Image (cartoon, rainbow, N blue to C red):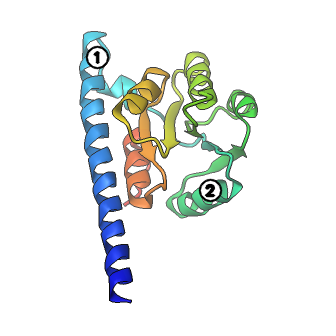
């Protein structure tokens, strides 16, 4: 029994290390993006200056995750204005609702999440996009950013990390 508990504890510690490693990768990528933005004469305010109040759209094939994210964010004043499990509906929701932020899951092989995020960013450049994925490779994160993601969050989604990201993308919201 003790061996099982020790094994579970080790698995938890390994997962926490993976999350910390991913957070370091994301921070490094954000630093690279800042340099790219400076090269294009864009200030940090231009990148993050999104007014709040237009809500959030969640695009994920898991209705359980959609519901859990909604329940998590509502007490902090975030308004989930739309959810969908279909990438094709995502663009229509964004067009109709004009949210400040879209949270999109993607599966790398079909790239529909990436293409949807690219299309949203092209048509609505002021809309912030968070890509959520179990993919932790640096190339995957870079590709998501190239396709318009403002942030990348690993799944399972850490509530603390998500709230930090939302506060950085929608600075007028105070989540702490």
Q: Residue 168: x and y, percent?
A: 37, 42
Mark 2 crowdedness (10 Å alpha carbons): few <14, some 14-19, many ≥20 = some
Which residue is label 2 attached to? Answer: 65
Q: Residue 156: x and y, percent?
A: 49, 56
Q: Residue 93: x and y, percent?
A: 72, 34
94 with respect to 174 (left or right): right
> Quick one: quadrant of the N terminus?
bottom left
Which residue is label 1 attached to? Answer: 36
Residue drawn where x is 57% and y is 27% of the image = 117
Q: Which type of secondary structure does the marked residue at label 1 adopt?
A: helix
Q: Residue 34's quadrant in the figure?
A: top left
Residue drawn where x is 64% and y is 45% of the image = 60
Q: Residue 96's quadrant in the figure?
A: top right
* Res. 144 mark: none
- The residue positioned farthest toward the bottom in the image shown: 1
30 with respect to 133 (left or right): left
- The residue positioned farthest toward the top in the image shown: 40
Q: Nearer the viewer, residue 96 or 132?
A: 132
Mark 1 crowdedness (10 Å alpha carbons): few <14, some 14-19, many ≥20 = few
Q: Residue 157: x and y, percent?
A: 47, 55
Q: Between disc 2 and disc 1, whose residue precedes?
A: 1
Q: Nearer the viewer, residue 164 or 175?
A: 164
């Amino acid at each position: 029994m003790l061996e099982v508990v020790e094994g579970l504890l080790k698995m938890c510690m390994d997962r926490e290390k993976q999350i910390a490693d991913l957070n370091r990768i994301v921070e490094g990528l954000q630093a690279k993006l800042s340099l790219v933005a400076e090269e294009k004469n864009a200030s940090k305010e231009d990148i993050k200056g999104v007014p709040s109040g237009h809500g959030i759209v969640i695009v994920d094939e898991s209705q359980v995750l959609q519901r859990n994210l909604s329940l998590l964010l509502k007490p902090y004043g975030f308004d989930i204005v739309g959810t969908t499990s279909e990438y094709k509906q995502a663009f229509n929701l964004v067009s109709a609702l004009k949210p400040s932020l879209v949270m999109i899951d993607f599966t790398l092989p079909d790239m529909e999440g990436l293409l949807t995020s690219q299309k949203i960013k092209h048509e609505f450049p002021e809309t912030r996009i968070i890509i959520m994925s179990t993919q932790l490779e640096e190339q995957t994160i870079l590709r998501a950013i190239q396709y318009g993601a403002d942030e990348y969050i690993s799944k399972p989604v850490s509530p603390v990390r998500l709230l930090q990201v939302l506060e950085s993308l929608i600075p007028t919201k105070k989540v702490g």
